[in-house]
Image (spheres, grey):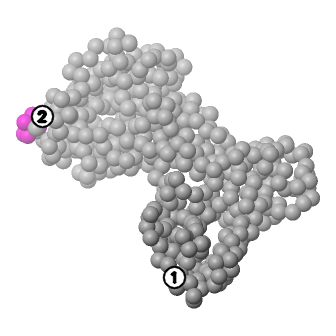
Amino acid sequence: MKATQYAITDIETTGGNASGSRITEIAIIIHDGTKIIERWETLVNPEQEIPLPIFALTGINNDMVRHAPIFDDIAEKVMELLSGRIFVAHNVNFDYSFIRHQLEQSGFKWTAKKLCTVRAARKIKPGLASYSLGNLCRALGINIENRHRAGGDADATAILFSRLLEWDTEAEIEKMLKKASQDQRLPPNVPHEDFEQLPEKPGVYYFYNAEKKVVYVGKAVNLKKRVASHFSGHKVTPQRQHFLRDIHSISFETCATELMALLLECTEIRKLWPIYNKALKRFEGKYGLYEYEARNGYRYLAVGKLHKQQSCIRMFYNEYDGIYLLLDLAARFNISHRFCIFGKPAEGEIIYQPNLASLPSVEDHNQRVTEAINSLSKDRPSFAILDKGRHPDERSCIWVENGDFYGMGYVGSDVGFKQPSEIREYVTQYKSNQYLMQLVNAFVKKYPGKVVTQSPLAATF
């Protein structure tokens, strides 16, 4: 550690993400673990306009950088100062992502060990109200001149770093610099203990913002490994950088199986609608199969868009699936297509009245519609899925009722049942949807031996 040198760095930029913004100022201070041995700073022409909010924060305007060197002109100097040294910054991943990206654009490949003074301060001086550079320096009596300028913030970070080295009686910084340390990949606002408590088991994890609101829900076969994967890599897209910056804490719920984790993830996303969950939101049903009676007494079947105030017989992701089912029902139960509406009429709209002389009697037709609707329930069985539990003394159970996901839970391995339906008393009920049943049906097809549809039900499996 004595021979180790540190490059304490701060930058100012035109915006918050490395892929679309540029560096306007950079300061690098070389520290040998005892004292500062070199200092360098410069303005940088970003070759793009500096937004007014950035000018208001930093005081750097377009005129100030007009005749400054562009990054290509200083890239070799930056590489010389950073190479072979540990990269230190307050919220290190922000500065690291910008410099790495712009060096790459200038033709230089650079990687380095990183040390975040936010994370180091949390470990060495825990319990402070805030770990932003300004608040942290005020709390520790460190004077900052030229706040929000690269040189001023780098000078303050260097003083903070020196003091952290003095106070580090438990060798926390040395631990953080170990190659395998997860600290170097965690977002700056995530407590180390939140990550350390994650088990290597299946489950669902939750990312929270500073206001303790869930911003992302995910499922995992291995919770620790999956969460760590979010923080690896060097993508500099705005979406990724905003995502990582918004994560302030992590919680989790273990599940016995991957299927239960998938089901819980889906239900939690539908309940919480986290801002960064995009994929599962597309599985919201948009169309439904409806049944209604016209003035002439004939019952109609119709496929149309879902309406919150109207219940439907069956829900679909797209109109095609609804039309396909309606055509199938009409063929199987000999229902005239004149009573099948592909696109639900608006309220109050007059429905075409067919020539009654060429149609079956009202009673005969309506009976066929009843049989068609009833067939949908008969085609939707009730069954249970029994699988391993979270530990040897329990089993996991999922109950499907009339083709809809009813709920899931856990039961002691010594509990027996006379009928599969008794399992529903041991599960937590959830709202079903078509995507959940797709997951369940795919599992049933792959593992039929774990499905229970008849009694008596064995006490073990």
**Type of amino acid under label 2:** Asn
Which SS class for mark 1? loop
Vertical placement of 191 versus 319: above or below?
Answer: above
What amino acid is found at the position of numbered circle 1 in the picture?
Pro
Which of 353/450 is in front?
Answer: 353
* Picture residue at 7% right of the left edge, 39% below the top: 67
Read off the magenta span.
Answer: 63-67
Q: Tell me how far mark 1 sits from mark 2, CA to CA.
A: 74 Å
Query: Which residue is found at the position 24% from the left and 45% from the top?
Result: 21
Q: Is residue 379 left or right of residue 273?
A: right
Q: Is residue 394 above or below residue 281?
A: above
In the depicted view, which residue is nearer to us: 358 or 65? 358
- Rendered-image quadrant of the C terminus: bottom right
* CB within 8 Å, label 1 to label 2: no
The answer to whether residue 351 is visible is yes
| Residue 167 pos. (x, y %) | 46, 15
How many numbered tags mark residues here? 2
Q: Position of residue 231 (x, y in %)?
A: 47, 43
Question: Can you give x and y, in whole percent of width and height, for residue 60 in the image?
Answer: 15, 32
Viewer-side label of 1, 2: 1
Label 2 Cα crowd, 10 Å radius (few <14 / some 14-19 / many 20+): some
- Is residue 283 something that shows in the picture? no
Q: Is residue 126 magenta?
A: no
In this view, which residue lies farthest toward the top? 141
Numbered circle sitting on residue 354: 1
* CA neighbours of label 1 inside 10 A, class few (<14), some (14 to 19), many (20+): few
Residue 239 in the image: state x and y as whole percent.
37, 47
Question: Looking at the image, which is closer to me, 456 or 129?
Answer: 456
Q: Residue beneath label 2, please?
A: 61
> Which SS class for mark 2?
loop
- Residue in view at x 62 percent, y 81 percent: 335
Q: What label sits on residue 58 in the rendered view? A: none
